[in-house]
Amino acid sequence: MRRPIISAPPLPLRALSPFALAAALLLGCEPAPEPEFASPVGYDGLLEEMRTGTRAEVEDYDTGEMVERDLVGFDQALDERFGSPADPAVFTTLPVRFSSSEAAVIDVLDDEEAETTVFTLAPIQGAETVPAVAKGDVLHWNDEFGSPHEAVVAAVEGDAITVPLVPFEARPVSLPLGFNEETGEPLPGTVVIGDADLLEEGRELYAVHCLHCHGSTGAGDGPTAKYLHPLPRDYRSGMYKYTSTGTGIASRADLTRILRDGIPGTYMPSFHPALDAEKTASVVEYVRWLSMQGQYAKGVTDEAAFTYGDEAVRERLESEEGLTREDLVQELIEYWPDDVTGKLSFVGTFLAENWALAESEPPVTPNEPRPVLTGDELAASIERGKGLYLQKSTQCASCHGSRGLGNGPQTVSVQLDAATGDPYAEPGIHDVWGEVVQPRNLTRGIYRGGRRPIDLYRRIYSGIPASNMPGFGDNLSDEQIWDLVNFLMALPLHPSLLDGAELDVSHDDDAVAAARPALPPAAPELKADQS
């Protein structure tokens, strides 16, 4: 078992499900073990000093003298940025709604003599006023390098909030402002006043409604997960199958729809009306935050592994004459801002931009609306869609089968793992979580991403990246996609549409042929929808 990066206090009793709470009280059992974020693969292989931090002699920025200082490692950095599943930290770099009390910072004035900093606050976008701030409140923010800060309010005068000066030796800078890369002008930063109350509300609701399947950290490993097929979603990769954004990153609207409608054909139920709009929004924020934590921890691990991972260290020690492990530690200390702070900043910025993009970009929408067709026109569109389905260039039938039963030859072929280049041990199509994917049985008309025409359009246009279903938005026109949609909507009512259809198993692409070394006979008809 990998050592957890972050430990967490046990969930309070009010966060347990009613069943778990009753069992604990009746049986005299302790509450469930405290939830912990697990280390991503490769984390334990990083240079120990990079993970744990170290005490070293470094040059003081102001005096130029050498001083002893504790350098923050990834363990502490991850703890500061995310806390634990039961006690989430405020990390304002991320596009997450942490609190109902947030404000924009439009000016910062440091008074080094008084050892104070004054923030001038303004309403955040969409708000009319600045939330009330009182002496003793705790402010949370991130500086331009993505480092988290917090300080207790020392004085309040109108919109001017005074806090103790954050010294340089503690963090690179204390400014919660961003800067326009083109003009250099400061941009408003965000400060959170008090705790992450919205996120904590989402965590409590998640513990009641979601934890038993998706697990305390969103790893898809809850106590009931092993009994379910397909397995509950593992949020840590940040990938979701059914999005409207055209990418694997889900927008808030996508996650809200799933909570409201459920996912037909799976054990994911609808939570409407059990969760109203406000509660649903809280759960959505908590799920997004769990995804970002997993992506962030893996991102910093991957970045650091290039130089200070097990394999990289071994190769350097073998290839560079006279180099010792102590030399590597000294190198790490000398270039700490680049090797630690820089990596943390890069991953945080990249992550924030991608999740923000999922909110700012409009959902995939056809340029041409679905034509209203009846009679012979509709029949002709369905026939064109059938032709596209069976066409060699689309290869739809190679996965979904010549009769649309989800039993195409790729479901029994040995595929190559894109990450390793090695064949999977189990035949079939695999998703990004390494699980075998059973393509949809199209004759049933049950679609997990939604059965509306626009839902089918989006699946065809964008594909399902997490499941290796390709998108055809760059290759098919809107008219052709609508023909396919009309065909798919007609097939459950008229399965005979594919009677006598034959699958073209030829390949034009050598790379595709190499990745799929054998095309055995089509599998027998499926008796149940297993995808």
Image: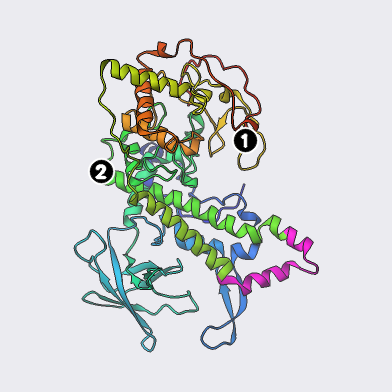
Q: Determine the residue positioned at 40% across, 35% down.
A: 461
Please state the horizontal and vertical placement of residue 305, each as a whole percent of the image: 63, 57
**How many other residues sit within 10 Å of disc 1, few (<14), some (14-19) or many (≥20)?**
few
Q: Is residue 132 above or below residue 203?
A: below
User: Which mark identifies residue 283?
Assistant: none
Q: Quadrant of residue 473?
A: top left
Few, some or many C-alpha atoms within 10 Å of disc 2 (few <14, some 14-19, many ≥20)?
few
Which residue was labeled with disc 2?
A: 277
Q: Which quadrant holds residue 267? A: top left
Mark 1–mark 2 Cα distance, whole angstroms, equals: 47 Å
Q: Does dot 1 land on a helix, a strand or a loop? A: helix
> Which amino acid does the dot numbered 1 rest on?
Ala
Residue 369 within the segment the image draws in magenta: no
Does 483 sit above or below residue 316? above
Q: Which residue is mark 1?
A: 511
Q: What element does badge 2 sit on? A: helix
First of labels 1, 2 by sequence position: 2
Part of the protein shown in magenta = 314-337
Residue that protrudes farthest toward the left in the picture: 128
Q: Indicate yes or no whether the magenta region holds residue 322.
A: yes
Residue closer to the observer: 423 or 290: 423
Amino acid marked by disc 2: Ala
Among the 4 quarters of the image, the one containing residue 93:
bottom left
- Foreground residue, 457 or 415? 457
Which sits in the foreground, 163 or 299? 299
